[in-house]
Amino acid sequence: MAESAPPRRRARTVLALLVIAALLAGGAFAALKYNYDAAGPADHTVRVQVRAGDTLHSVFSRLSALGGLPHPRAVELYLRLTGAQPRMEIGVYDIPPYSSPAQIVRMFQEGRVVLDKLTVVEGSTFAQFLAELDADPDIVPSLRGKSDAAIMAALGHPGQKPEGRFFPDTYSFSPGTTDLTILQMAYQEMAKELAKVWRERSPGLPLASPYQALILASMIEKETGVADERARIAGVFINRLRRGMRLQSDPTVIYALGTRYHGALYARDLEVKSPFNTYLHAGLPPTPICLPGLASLLAAVHPDKTRDLYFVATGKGGHHFSRTLAEHDIQLRKYIRQLRRDRLAEQTHTPGRTQ
């Protein structure tokens, strides 16, 4: 019968095996860490989307299939062994060439998603804003077919009219963002800007509320695209409001006509039955007529101190301002003559021939 190994020798053997196991484990862990920090194989940008409910395993598998992540299970094992539980922000990611797993995980944690942009142009109407949202393929439509009242209720502002309440700007968003989310951003931005300009308004204005300033700003926005004229046009409207004169603003009539407007106003249009027709009704229209920008908001609350009561387009860009009706009528006749000359020139112009 063979003698068993002495206890001391057995202990040395066990210790040796443990050392070997530790070395092997350490080597395996070092290999996992090396893989985690090593540059990835992709020589091009790899785009991957993280959706709601995705797990690290599902995203890593998609990345691996796209050639952006080698050995995804090794990456998962390394994260498990280190006790890391990285979160992933939802969105679309562009993974740069040769990104290591460590860099990719960091991008997910920091939410470095690809952002699209939507520009809302100053002077757009709310309907045009909705059309832009609906046409963007990266925006999820959640409001399509809903009435203005339903949209405002969804935004948490039931009973409000939407026109003018959204700030025209360029908004960044990740693909998959809903139209409601972007409307919320634009609504909050307008509320912030309007509150600020109202706090800093000139004293003594015949405007009873920030909303009235918003309405006036929308009229200024549609009256001129010349930056230096905004405050002067605001001054004319303020003077007329103080005197109880009708504002007689063509853009309000155009807004009232809606789809019936085809690029030119006629005398009969000035008789259109609408509360927006400032040729028939005194004071401001009931709501804004567009989404005004910051420059028009500022002009509305800081109008020029002027004695002007009238303005008319020059036909060459900008407007001519007048203090009296007689002077205004002279300038109006000049403008009409200029329009007639321009139309005649268009009718007699032969394409390809210099007149």
Image (cartoon, rainbow, N blue to C red):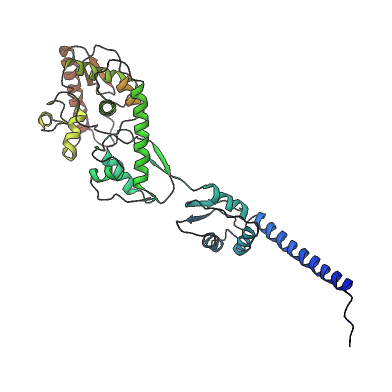
Q: Quadrant of the C terminus?
A: top left
Front-lying residue, 197 or 346: 197
Residue 220 visible here: no
Q: Is residue 264 left or right of residue 220?
A: left
Front-lying residue, 289 or 328: 289
Residue 41 falls in image quadrant: bottom right
Residue 110, horizontal then vertical, whole percent? 54, 47
Q: Please, is residue 15 above or below residue 247 in the view?
A: below
Q: Please, is residue 339 above or below residue 88 in the view?
A: above
Residue 173 visible here: yes
Residue 144, horizontal then vertical, whole percent? 28, 50
Residue 153, horizontal then vertical, whole percent? 27, 44
Front-lying residue, 30 or 228: 30
Residue at 44 percent across and 48 percent down: it is 174
Total marks placed = 0
Front-lying residue, 144 or 187: 187
Residue 331, horizontal then vertical, whole percent? 19, 17
Q: Quadrant of the N terminus?
A: bottom right
- In the image, farthest residue toward the bottom: 1
Residue at 52 percent across and 53 percent down: it is 88
Residue at 37 percent across and 34 percent down: it is 189
